[in-house]
Image (spheres, rainbow, N blue to C red):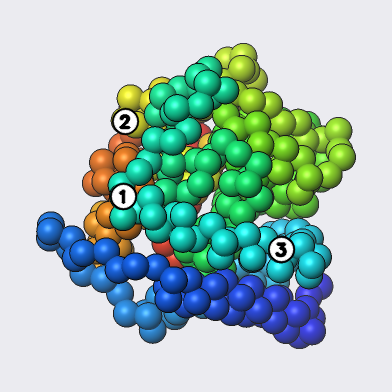
Amino acid sequence: MVSALDRLSYAARQTARVAWYAGHYAAGRRLLKPLPKPDFPIGPTPTRAELTADLRGLFEREWQDIAAGLFAAPTLPGPDPAELLRRSALYFRDLPKVDARRHGRINDEPNHHEANAHLPRYYRQNFHFQSGGWLTEESATIYDTQVEVLFTGAADAMRRRMLRPIAEWMKGRRQREVLGLDIGCGTGRLLAFLHGAWPGMRLTGIDLSAPYLEEARRLIGRTARVKLLEAAAEALPFDDASLDLVVSSFLLHELPKKVRAEALAEMARVVKHGGLVVIVESIQKGDKPDWDGLLDLFPYYFHEPYYAEYANGSIDAWCNAAGLKPVASERAFLACVNAYTKG
């Protein structure tokens, strides 16, 4: 049973988180040089008040699921105050470098390092114009700060919306019999939430970035229930129909069209009949028509080479082509959460 104090505690934590990252966003804007206005048509965009109201709705839905007993309130430990401040300082120190790449349209620095030659070409880029792309310890250290600033403290909450369809699917199942996979796990935030909600699950996270996997190990800690492997989404190192649960968050929009189709086909290949595939991704055109302009602007301000094609497509259509059948869907602020079974 949850109490009024539990609700107040949850609300206080989320409010503090949003205020912290919104403050970073406001301060960072002052350090950035303005880009010229786009020379292409931009769709409608929401007001700040509309975004704030929608964000509040996201937190309210999560609280209602917690109160209903679907899963516990998130307890993922954050960095201690000194580490939080250190990462904040690193974020602001790196921001001028990001801005210089944005104005210079420099986006392929990781491609010129021999140490990265074994990785797919599409991966060796400065996504978001960030330093090191996804391939340095420095990038892994400040990535979560960068993403939370972009989404004003909502990134984790958007990821956690996949806990609802998983909780519904888990009814009647024993945690210790569930084999799960997080594809493109990055710094391990989603894996940590899954492990916290169902500590008996046996989970594996894969990613192409060794530094990001190391950051995930530090976040999750020592546990035999979570394994981390360096592997690609389009070539999963698992047997056919060997996994009960497959998840990914904010992966598909970072993949070229051909690789995305291969990754979805791999998800369908490795999941069992009766298993579940859950994808958290950016909204697409038409999911919230009055916000379509945000999807036009995002790849203009950030190096997102595959985003425009992604935003104009349909996750449901792509998953259907891979043999996955939709069972649940929810828009979660700037993300969509889609759950599928193998058809």
Q: For mark 1, does the 10 Å Cα neighbourhood hold few (<14), some (14 to 19), or many (20 or more) residues?
A: few
Q: Amino acid at mark 2?
A: Lys
Q: Where is the C terminus found, in terms of image quarters?
A: top left
Q: Amino acid at mark 1?
A: Gly
**Label 3 vs label 1, nearer the camera:** 1
Q: Amino acid at mark 3?
A: Arg
Q: Earlier in the sequence, mark 3 or mark 2?
A: 3
Marking on residue 104: 1
**Label 1 vs label 2, nearer the camera:** 1
Q: Position of residue 21 (x, y in %)?
A: 57, 71
* Residue 124 against residue 282 in the figure, above or below: above
**Label 3 vs label 2, nearer the camera:** 3
Marking on residue 257: 2
Q: CA distance from mark 3 to mark 2?
A: 38 Å
Q: Nearer the viewer, residue 64 or 19?
A: 19
Callout 3: SS: helix
Q: Nearer the viewer, residue 173 or 162?
A: 162
Question: What's the residue at 27%, 54% (across, down)?
Answer: 300
Task: Report whether 255 appears left or right of 277.
Answer: left
Question: What's the residue at 66%, 50% (across, down)?
Answer: 141
Q: For mark 2, does the 10 Å Cα neighbourhood hold few (<14), some (14 to 19), or many (20 or more) residues?
A: some
Q: Earlier in the sequence, mark 1 or mark 2?
A: 1
Q: Position of residue 34 (x, y in %)?
A: 30, 68
Question: What's the residue at 57%, 23% (across, down)?
Answer: 115
Q: Which residue is mark 3?
A: 86
Question: What's the residue at 31%, 30% (across, down)?
Answer: 257
Q: Position of residue 217 (x, y in %)?
A: 77, 40
Marking on residue 222: none
